[in-house]
Image (cartoon, rainbow, N blue to C red):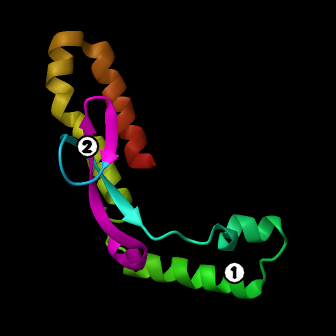
């Protein structure tokens, strides 16, 4: 995401603590964290401000829609798409604990697993 908005980022600065003072600079003091320095953006051009002042128009909305669509089109897929088959296989994993449940807890609890697996197949 950061690379998509690279024009607003300037650099990364060390956040240092020297005794009781916190500073954003190179030099003395132990590095406690890092901060990203960014260009100041005109806050009056934020969408919430434009809407509040009733200055947002269809051009603003279209630009925002295009930006969001572009962002999503270029986004890396982090997870596989939802799959009901994967869900059913995952749920059927209850079979792997069936013997242990039977030995440790008894037939009453394996009956619950049997019922859940049956419902899963019908679902």
Image depth: mark 2 or mark 1 in front: 2
Q: Which residue is drawn at 55% across and 71% down?
A: 41
Give 54 or 76, whichever is nearer the viewer. Answer: 54
The number of callouts visible is 2
From the viewer's perspective, is residue 104 above or below residue 116? above
Locate residue 64: give its quadrant. Answer: bottom right
Locate residue 62: give its quadrant. Answer: bottom right
Tell me the residue that label 2 is attached to.
16
Give 111 or 71, whichever is nearer the viewer. Answer: 71
Q: Which residue is drawn at 62% across and 85% down?
A: 63
Tell me the residue that label 1 is attached to.
61
Image-based side of 82 in relation to 59, left or right: left
**Is there any visible trace of residue 1 in the rendered image?**
no
Q: Which residue is drawn at 42% across and 81% down?
A: 73
Locate residue 42: give its quadrant. Answer: bottom right
Q: Which residue is drawn at 53% across and 77% down?
A: 68
- Find the magenta span and give its range: 1-23
- The verdict on residue 68 being magenta is no
Helix, strand or loop for disc 1: helix
Characterize the local packing of mark 2: few (<14), some (14-19) or many (20 or more) Cα atoms within 10 angstroms. many
Helix, strand or loop for disc 2: strand
Query: Quick one: which residue is furthest to the top in this view?
Result: 105
Image-based side of 60 in relation to 72, left or right: right
- x and y, in percent, of residue 2 in the image: 35, 69
From the viewer's perspective, is residue 80 above or below residue 109? below
Q: Earlier in the sequence, mark 2 or mark 1?
A: 2
- The verdict on residue 3 being magenta is yes
Give 109 or 53, whichever is nearer the viewer. Answer: 53
């Amino acid at each position: 995401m950061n690379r998509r908005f690279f024009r607003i980022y300037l650099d990364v600065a060390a956040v240092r603590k020297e005794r009781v003072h916190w500073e954003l600079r190179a030099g003395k003091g132990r590095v406690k964290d890092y901060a990203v320095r960014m260009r100041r953006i005109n806050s009056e051009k934020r969408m919430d401000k434009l809407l509040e002042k009733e200055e947002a128009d269809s051009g603003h909305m279209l630009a925002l829609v295009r930006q969001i669509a572009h962002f999503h089109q270029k986004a890396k897929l982090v997870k596989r798409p939802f799959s009901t088959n994967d869900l059913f296989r995952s749920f059927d994993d209850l079979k792997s604990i069936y013997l242990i449940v039977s030995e440790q807890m008894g037939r009453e609890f394996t009956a619950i697993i049997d019922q859940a697996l049956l419902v899963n197949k019908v679902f």
